[in-house]
Image (cartoon, rainbow, N blue to C red):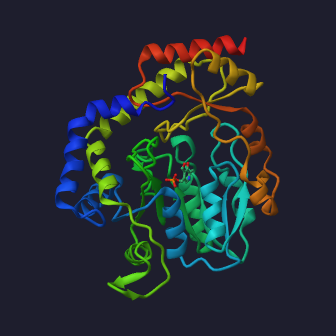
């Protein structure tokens, strides 16, 4: 059993993916070819955003968003302590200071009730993360940001396709930033990502930053990066997009089936006014190392997202603030195999092995 089954997906889409890749090889525009604009148009429409700017990765999307917002040294960005390193890493790399806020113990998403108390004169933006595929309380976050004149960047690396109060993740705030890392809900076959915004000036800034700050060829109006997503990866996402609605339905069905089968075992909660695209299907267990070892012995791959909150990581400890719910989650979370092609029989095997390991 695989943790994320990309082989079955490729088998189902082989002719469309191969055809799309061949078309790029035939026209030869490997950088900024026609598939780049095509996928940007399709993804903007999908998320209900005015602009989509494809970029080299989800990490690059966060960096370019912060650069477009003109983050200055010393500016503070409020974010969650319980996330992948890239979130805080890009804040630091862009010259900012991460301000870590704790999570809700049940959803593992940033606790919005703790955000306003951490705003200072230096705060520039709030960067919530839609962890495991579920958007946090972003309307409340947007309201706080509006009161204080701040931007909100949704780190939507794990939540492309998720619905929040009838709207799509990525199209909910100043910027949405997603990742097309192969194992993400919508993935390519390498690195890729995208930024979304309704703001014309920010979209223009992001487009320029993506190509070394050029507003015209060799006319560098700002400092940028080499941050493009290559044409072949855009072609792969275009092919995968054809089956994406079906995959979202399957993910919802498999997620709901997991929730039923796992009854009695603590799971990440999903709020009633939104869904999860189940980038990860995560449970909380005591004696996690022993449980994980027992599952491994039974042939079930698992993963831990993440074993330590960022404020406790050596590179970020200087910005430490007490985040007890994050620390507790980091000690107990365990992600189970999940993908749109997960078979019922395999899912049954996962849950049986987990129940055995917990007794
Ligand atoms: C929450 C979060 N932010 C950012 C990223 C970075 O995305 P990428 O791997 O495409 O650079 C990831 C990817 O794992 C992520 O999970």
Image vertical order of residue 300 relative to residue 208, above or below: above
> To which quarter of the image does residue 78 belong?
bottom right
Image-based side of 114 in relation to 211, left or right: right
- 166 or 248: nearer the eye? 248
> To which quarter of the image does residue 86 belong?
bottom right
- 265 or 225: nearer the eye? 225
Image vertical order of residue 64 relative to residue 136, above or below: below
Q: Position of residue 180 (x, y in %)?
A: 42, 50
Q: Position of residue 12 (x, y in %)?
A: 27, 30
At horizontal 81% and vertical 63% (from top left) the residue drawn is 318
Image-based side of 44 in relation to 301, left or right: left
Image-based side of 73 in relation to 163, left or right: right
Number of marks present in the image shown: 0
Q: Position of residue 254 (x, y in %)?
A: 44, 25
Q: Position of residue 5 (x, y in %)?
A: 43, 30
At horizontal 50% and vertical 51% (from top left) the residue drawn is 157
Image vertical order of residue 224 relative to residue 338, above or below: below
Q: Quadrant of the C terminus?
A: top right
Image vertical order of residue 350 relative to residue 26, above or below: above
> To which quarter of the image does residue 112 belong?
bottom right
- 163 or 251: nearer the eye? 251
At horizontal 76% and vertical 52% (from top left) the residue drawn is 313
- 36 or 76: nearer the eye? 36
At horizontal 64% and vertical 49% (from top left) the residue drawn is 83
């Amino acid at each position: 059993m695989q943790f994320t089954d990309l082989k079955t997906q490729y088998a189902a889409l082989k002719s469309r993916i191969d055809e799309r890749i061949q078309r790029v090889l035939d026209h030869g525009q490997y950088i900024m070819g026609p598939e780049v604009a095509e996928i940007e148009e399709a993804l903007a429409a999908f998320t209900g955003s005015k602009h989509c700017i494809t970029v080299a990765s989800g990490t690059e999307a966060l960096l370019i968003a912060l650069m477009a917002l003109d983050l200055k040294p010393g500016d503070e960005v409020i974010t969650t302590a319980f996330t992948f390193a890239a979130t805080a890493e890009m804040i630091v790399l862009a010259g900012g200071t991460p301000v870590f806020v704790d999570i809700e113990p049940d959803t593992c998403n940033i606790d919005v009730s703790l955000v306003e108390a951490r705003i200072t004169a230096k705060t520039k933006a709030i960067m919530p993360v839609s962890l495991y595929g579920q958007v946090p309380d972003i309307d409340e976050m947007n309201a706080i940001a509006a009161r204080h004149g701040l931007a909100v960047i949704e780190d939507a690396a794990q939540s492309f396709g998720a619905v929040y109060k009838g709207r799509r993740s990525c199209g909910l705030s100043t910027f949405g930033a997603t990742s097309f890392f192969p194992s993400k809900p919508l993935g390519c076959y390498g690195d890729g990502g995208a930024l979304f915004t309704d703001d014309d000036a920010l979209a223009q800034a992001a487009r320029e930053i993506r190509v070394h700050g050029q507003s015209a060829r060799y006319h560098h109006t700002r400092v940028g990066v080499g941050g493009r997503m290559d044409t072949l990866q855009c072609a792969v996402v275009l092919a995968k997009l054809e089956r994406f609605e079906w995959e979202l339905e399957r993910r919802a069905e498999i997620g709901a089936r997991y929730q039923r089968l796992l009854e009695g075992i603590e799971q990440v909660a999903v709020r009633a006014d939104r869904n999860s695209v189940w980038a990860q299907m995560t449970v909380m267990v005591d004696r996690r190392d022993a449980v994980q070892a027992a599952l491994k012995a039974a042939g079930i791959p698992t993963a831990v997202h993440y074993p330590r909150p960022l404020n406790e990581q050596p590179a970020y400890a200087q910005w430490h603030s007490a985040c007890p719910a994050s620390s507790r989650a980091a000690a107990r979370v365990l992600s189970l195999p999940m993908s749109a092609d997960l078979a019922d029989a395999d899912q049954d095997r996962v849950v049986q092995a987990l129940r055995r390991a917990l007794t």
